Protein backbone atom coordinates (compact mmCIF):
# COMPACT_ATOMS: atom_id res chain seq x y z
CA UNK A 1 0.00 0.00 0.00
CA UNK A 2 2.82 2.40 0.91
CA UNK A 3 4.69 1.61 -2.35
CA UNK A 4 1.52 2.20 -4.40
CA UNK A 5 1.01 5.46 -2.49
CA UNK A 6 4.55 6.66 -3.34
CA UNK A 7 3.92 5.97 -7.06
CA UNK A 8 0.49 7.68 -7.04
CA UNK A 9 1.84 10.72 -5.15
CA UNK A 10 4.78 11.08 -7.54
CA UNK A 11 2.57 10.92 -10.66
CA UNK A 12 -0.13 13.13 -9.13
CA UNK A 13 2.33 15.87 -8.15
CA UNK A 14 4.03 15.95 -11.58
CA UNK A 15 0.81 15.88 -13.66
CA UNK A 16 -1.53 17.82 -11.35
CA UNK A 17 -4.01 14.93 -11.21
CA UNK A 18 -5.73 13.32 -8.25
CA UNK A 19 -4.71 9.84 -7.17
CA UNK A 20 -8.06 8.33 -8.21
CA UNK A 21 -7.09 7.69 -11.84
CA UNK A 22 -4.05 5.70 -10.64
CA UNK A 23 -5.24 4.27 -7.34
CA UNK A 24 -8.78 3.07 -8.10
CA UNK A 25 -7.80 0.59 -10.89
CA UNK A 26 -4.82 -0.75 -8.84
CA UNK A 27 -6.83 -1.17 -5.63
CA UNK A 28 -9.86 -2.77 -7.29
CA UNK A 29 -8.26 -4.91 -10.03
CA UNK A 30 -4.93 -5.92 -8.49
CA UNK A 31 -5.61 -5.86 -4.76
CA UNK A 32 -9.30 -6.84 -4.71
CA UNK A 33 -10.46 -3.81 -2.69
CA UNK A 34 -14.19 -3.03 -2.89
CA UNK A 35 -14.88 -0.07 -5.25
CA UNK A 36 -16.60 1.85 -2.41
CA UNK A 37 -13.46 1.76 -0.22
CA UNK A 38 -11.18 2.38 -3.22
CA UNK A 39 -13.04 5.63 -3.99
CA UNK A 40 -12.92 6.65 -0.32
CA UNK A 41 -9.15 6.00 -0.26
CA UNK A 42 -8.67 8.00 -3.49
CA UNK A 43 -10.35 11.04 -1.85
CA UNK A 44 -7.80 10.86 0.98
CA UNK A 45 -5.10 10.37 -1.68
CA UNK A 46 -6.04 13.64 -3.37
CA UNK A 47 -5.76 15.54 -0.06
CA UNK A 48 -2.40 13.88 0.69
CA UNK A 49 -1.04 14.62 -2.83
CA UNK A 50 -2.16 18.24 -2.55
CA UNK A 51 -0.63 18.62 0.94
CA UNK A 52 2.70 17.05 -0.03
CA UNK A 53 3.12 18.90 -3.32
CA UNK A 54 1.65 22.32 -2.51
CA UNK A 55 4.22 23.10 0.21
CA UNK A 56 7.11 22.76 -2.26
CA UNK A 57 5.25 24.63 -5.02
CA UNK A 58 4.47 27.52 -2.65
CA UNK A 59 8.07 27.70 -1.44
CA UNK A 60 9.34 27.86 -5.03
CA UNK A 61 6.51 30.21 -6.10
CA UNK A 62 5.48 28.06 -9.07
CA UNK A 63 1.75 27.83 -8.37
CA UNK A 64 -0.48 30.82 -9.05
CA UNK A 65 -2.40 31.39 -5.79
CA UNK A 66 -4.66 34.10 -7.25
CA UNK A 67 -5.76 31.88 -10.16
CA UNK A 68 -6.37 28.98 -7.74
CA UNK A 69 -8.62 31.00 -5.44
CA UNK A 70 -10.46 32.62 -8.37
CA UNK A 71 -11.20 29.31 -10.14
CA UNK A 72 -12.09 27.60 -6.86
CA UNK A 73 -15.19 29.85 -6.75
CA UNK A 74 -16.31 28.32 -10.08
CA UNK A 75 -15.71 24.69 -9.01
CA UNK A 76 -17.53 25.20 -5.70
CA UNK A 77 -20.55 26.78 -7.43
CA UNK A 78 -20.47 23.97 -10.01
CA UNK A 79 -20.32 21.25 -7.35
CA UNK A 80 -23.33 22.79 -5.55
CA UNK A 81 -25.22 22.98 -8.88
CA UNK A 82 -24.29 19.35 -9.62
CA UNK A 83 -25.62 18.21 -6.24
CA UNK A 84 -28.90 20.06 -6.89
CA UNK A 85 -29.21 18.56 -10.41
CA UNK A 86 -28.80 14.95 -9.19
CA UNK A 87 -31.77 12.95 -10.48
CA UNK A 88 -32.72 15.65 -13.01
CA UNK A 89 -29.97 15.23 -15.62
CA UNK A 90 -29.12 11.86 -17.17
CA UNK A 91 -25.45 11.24 -16.25
CA UNK A 92 -24.79 9.34 -19.51
CA UNK A 93 -24.92 12.56 -21.57
CA UNK A 94 -22.51 14.25 -19.17
CA UNK A 95 -20.06 11.35 -19.44
CA UNK A 96 -20.20 11.57 -23.26
CA UNK A 97 -19.91 15.39 -23.29
CA UNK A 98 -16.98 15.59 -20.87
CA UNK A 99 -15.28 12.58 -22.48
CA UNK A 100 -15.35 14.32 -25.87
CA UNK A 101 -14.16 17.56 -24.27
CA UNK A 102 -11.11 15.84 -22.77
CA UNK A 103 -10.31 14.08 -26.07
CA UNK A 104 -10.50 17.45 -27.84
CA UNK A 105 -8.21 18.93 -25.17
CA UNK A 106 -5.69 16.11 -25.75
CA UNK A 107 -5.79 16.91 -29.50
CA UNK A 108 -5.22 20.62 -28.74
CA UNK A 109 -2.23 19.75 -26.57
CA UNK A 110 -0.73 17.67 -29.42
CA UNK A 111 -1.12 20.68 -31.74
CA UNK A 112 0.53 22.93 -29.15
CA UNK A 113 3.39 20.42 -28.84
CA UNK A 114 3.89 20.29 -32.62
CA UNK A 115 3.86 24.08 -32.95
CA UNK A 116 6.24 24.37 -29.99
CA UNK A 117 4.19 27.32 -28.72
CA UNK A 118 5.94 29.52 -26.20
CA UNK A 119 4.69 31.35 -23.12
CA UNK A 120 1.94 33.88 -23.77
CA UNK A 121 3.31 37.44 -23.69
CA UNK A 122 1.10 39.88 -25.58
CA UNK A 123 1.74 43.60 -25.99
CA UNK A 124 -1.74 44.27 -24.58
CA UNK A 125 -2.45 41.90 -21.66
CA UNK A 126 -5.96 40.58 -20.98
CA UNK A 127 -7.95 43.31 -19.19
CA UNK A 128 -9.60 40.95 -16.68
CA UNK A 129 -6.31 39.19 -15.90
CA UNK A 130 -4.69 42.56 -15.21
CA UNK A 131 -7.63 43.72 -13.09
CA UNK A 132 -7.57 40.59 -10.90
CA UNK A 133 -3.71 40.49 -10.96
CA UNK A 134 -3.63 36.92 -12.34
CA UNK A 135 -0.47 37.34 -14.46
CA UNK A 136 2.59 35.97 -12.69
CA UNK A 137 6.18 34.71 -12.93
CA UNK A 138 8.17 31.63 -11.88
CA UNK A 139 11.72 30.32 -12.07
CA UNK A 140 12.04 27.28 -14.37
CA UNK A 141 14.80 25.04 -12.98
CA UNK A 142 14.90 22.94 -16.18
CA UNK A 143 15.48 26.00 -18.42
CA UNK A 144 17.37 27.85 -15.63
CA UNK A 145 15.57 31.14 -16.26
CA UNK A 146 12.79 33.34 -14.88
CA UNK A 147 9.59 33.05 -16.94
CA UNK A 148 6.98 35.83 -16.93
CA UNK A 149 3.60 34.78 -18.29
CA UNK A 150 0.18 36.24 -18.94
CA UNK A 151 -3.28 34.72 -18.48
CA UNK A 152 -6.17 35.23 -20.90
CA UNK A 153 -9.78 34.16 -21.59
CA UNK A 154 -10.80 34.37 -17.91
CA UNK A 155 -14.56 33.81 -18.63
CA UNK A 156 -13.72 30.66 -20.66
CA UNK A 157 -11.57 29.22 -17.86
CA UNK A 158 -14.24 30.08 -15.28
CA UNK A 159 -16.95 28.38 -17.38
CA UNK A 160 -14.79 25.26 -17.83
CA UNK A 161 -14.22 25.05 -14.08
CA UNK A 162 -17.94 25.52 -13.38
CA UNK A 163 -18.66 22.61 -15.74
CA UNK A 164 -15.98 20.52 -14.04
CA UNK A 165 -17.62 21.27 -10.68
CA UNK A 166 -20.99 20.08 -12.02
CA UNK A 167 -19.34 16.87 -13.28
CA UNK A 168 -17.72 16.30 -9.88
CA UNK A 169 -20.99 16.87 -8.04
CA UNK A 170 -23.11 14.75 -10.38
CA UNK A 171 -20.74 11.96 -11.37
CA UNK A 172 -18.44 11.81 -8.34
CA UNK A 173 -15.29 12.12 -10.48
CA UNK A 174 -12.09 13.99 -9.74
CA UNK A 175 -11.59 17.03 -11.92
CA UNK A 176 -7.79 17.37 -11.99
CA UNK A 177 -7.69 16.83 -15.77
CA UNK A 178 -10.31 19.57 -16.26
CA UNK A 179 -8.39 21.97 -14.02
CA UNK A 180 -5.14 21.54 -15.94
CA UNK A 181 -7.01 21.79 -19.27
CA UNK A 182 -8.79 25.00 -18.20
CA UNK A 183 -5.52 26.68 -17.25
CA UNK A 184 -3.19 25.29 -19.94
CA UNK A 185 -5.47 25.13 -23.00
CA UNK A 186 -8.09 27.83 -22.36
CA UNK A 187 -6.30 30.38 -20.15
CA UNK A 188 -2.90 29.87 -21.88
CA UNK A 189 -0.92 29.41 -18.65
CA UNK A 190 2.39 27.48 -18.88
CA UNK A 191 2.07 23.78 -18.02
CA UNK A 192 4.17 23.86 -14.83
CA UNK A 193 2.10 26.56 -13.06
CA UNK A 194 -1.06 24.81 -14.37
CA UNK A 195 -0.22 21.41 -12.81
CA UNK A 196 1.03 22.91 -9.54
CA UNK A 197 -2.02 25.19 -9.21
CA UNK A 198 -4.27 22.19 -9.96
CA UNK A 199 -2.67 20.31 -7.04
CA UNK A 200 -3.67 23.05 -4.59
CA UNK A 201 -7.22 23.33 -5.95
CA UNK A 202 -7.86 19.57 -5.84
CA UNK A 203 -6.97 19.44 -2.15
CA UNK A 204 -9.50 22.17 -1.32
CA UNK A 205 -12.25 20.39 -3.30
CA UNK A 206 -11.45 16.93 -1.89
CA UNK A 207 -11.34 18.19 1.70
CA UNK A 208 -14.94 19.41 1.32
CA UNK A 209 -16.21 16.00 0.12
CA UNK A 210 -14.05 13.84 2.44
CA UNK A 211 -16.45 14.43 5.36
CA UNK A 212 -19.33 12.89 3.40
CA UNK A 213 -17.24 9.79 2.54
CA UNK A 214 -16.10 9.49 6.17
CA UNK A 215 -19.60 9.52 7.63
CA UNK A 216 -21.02 7.05 5.08
CA UNK A 217 -18.28 4.55 6.02
CA UNK A 218 -16.36 4.61 2.70
CA UNK A 219 -13.00 5.47 4.30
CA UNK A 220 -11.23 2.50 5.89
CA UNK A 221 -8.20 3.61 7.97
CA UNK A 222 -6.29 0.36 7.28
CA UNK A 223 -6.38 1.22 3.54
CA UNK A 224 -6.26 5.02 3.62
CA UNK A 225 -3.49 5.52 6.21
CA UNK A 226 -0.65 3.51 4.55
CA UNK A 227 -1.64 4.98 1.16
CA UNK A 228 -1.60 8.53 2.55
CA UNK A 229 1.84 7.99 4.13
CA UNK A 230 3.25 6.75 0.81
CA UNK A 231 1.54 9.55 -1.11
CA UNK A 232 3.00 12.27 1.14
CA UNK A 233 6.50 10.93 0.38
CA UNK A 234 5.75 10.50 -3.35
CA UNK A 235 4.13 13.94 -3.71
CA UNK A 236 7.06 15.65 -1.96
CA UNK A 237 9.51 13.89 -4.31
CA UNK A 238 7.28 14.53 -7.34
CA UNK A 239 6.98 18.25 -6.63
CA UNK A 240 10.78 18.55 -6.61
CA UNK A 241 11.23 16.31 -9.68
CA UNK A 242 8.66 18.26 -11.71
CA UNK A 243 10.68 21.48 -11.39
CA UNK A 244 13.65 19.84 -13.15
CA UNK A 245 11.59 18.30 -15.99
CA UNK A 246 10.97 20.20 -19.21
CA UNK A 247 7.40 21.34 -19.95
CA UNK A 248 7.56 19.34 -23.22
CA UNK A 249 8.35 16.10 -21.35
CA UNK A 250 5.49 16.67 -18.86
CA UNK A 251 3.12 17.34 -21.77
CA UNK A 252 4.22 14.10 -23.49
CA UNK A 253 3.22 12.18 -20.34
CA UNK A 254 0.05 14.18 -19.78
CA UNK A 255 -1.46 13.80 -23.29
CA UNK A 256 -1.95 9.97 -23.20
CA UNK A 257 -3.32 10.18 -19.63
CA UNK A 258 -5.81 12.87 -20.74
CA UNK A 259 -6.81 10.82 -23.81
CA UNK A 260 -7.30 7.71 -21.63
CA UNK A 261 -9.56 9.54 -19.14
CA UNK A 262 -11.57 11.09 -22.00
CA UNK A 263 -11.98 7.75 -23.79
CA UNK A 264 -12.97 5.99 -20.57
CA UNK A 265 -15.65 8.61 -19.81
CA UNK A 266 -16.99 8.51 -23.39
CA UNK A 267 -17.24 4.67 -23.40
CA UNK A 268 -18.89 4.71 -19.97
CA UNK A 269 -21.47 7.20 -21.26
CA UNK A 270 -22.24 5.03 -24.32
CA UNK A 271 -22.72 1.93 -22.13
CA UNK A 272 -25.08 3.60 -19.64
Image (tube, helix red, strand yellow):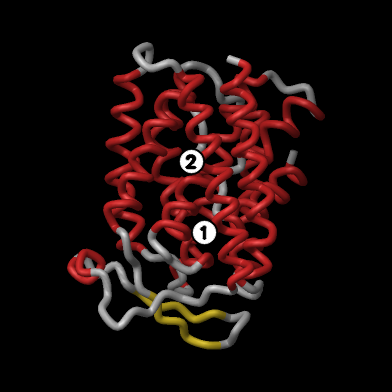
Look at 68% across and 47% down and name the residue there: 8
Residue extending furthest top? Answer: 87
**Crowd rating for badge 2 (residues with CA inside 10 Å; few <14, some 14–19, many 20+):** many
> Please, what secondary structure does the residue beneath circle 2 have?
loop
- Picture quarter with the N terminus: top right
Report which quarter residue 169 is drawn in.
top left
**Crowd rating for badge 1 (residues with CA inside 10 Å; few <14, some 14–19, many 20+):** many
- The x and y percentages for residue 52 are 55, 56
Would residue 234 be visible to someone looking at this image?
no
- The x and y percentages for residue 7 are 72, 50
- Picture quarter with the C terminus: top right
Which label was assigned to residue 80? none
- The x and y percentages for residue 249 are 68, 67
Q: How many marks?
A: 2
Look at 45% across and 38% down and name the residue there: 206
Look at 59% across and 38% down and name the residue there: 262
> Please, what secondary structure does the residue beneath circle 1 have?
helix
Mark earlier in primary sequence (1, 2): 2
Residue extending furthest right? Answer: 30
- The x and y percentages for residue 129 are 25, 67
Would residue 176 be visible to someone looking at this image?
yes
Residue extending furthest bottom? Answer: 145
Q: Is residue 46 above or below residue 124?
A: above
Foreground pick, 36 / 71 = 71
Foreground pick, 64 / 112 = 112
- In the displayed structure image, the side of residue 90 where residue 26 appears, left or right: right
Q: Is residue 88 above or below residue 163?
A: above
Report which quarter residue 45 is drawn in.
top right
Instruction: For marks 1 and 2, give the CA distance.
Output: 12 Å
Write down the residue under mark 1.
Answer: 195
Write down the residue under mark 2.
Answer: 175
Amino acid sequence: MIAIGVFAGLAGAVLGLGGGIILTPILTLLMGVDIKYAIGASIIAVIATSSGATIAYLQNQILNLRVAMFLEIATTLGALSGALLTGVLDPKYLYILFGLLLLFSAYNMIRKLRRNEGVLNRAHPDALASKFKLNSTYFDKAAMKQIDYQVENIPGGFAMMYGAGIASGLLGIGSGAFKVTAMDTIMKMPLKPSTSTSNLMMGVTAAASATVYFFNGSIKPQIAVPLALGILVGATLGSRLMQHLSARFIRLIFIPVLAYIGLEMFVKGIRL
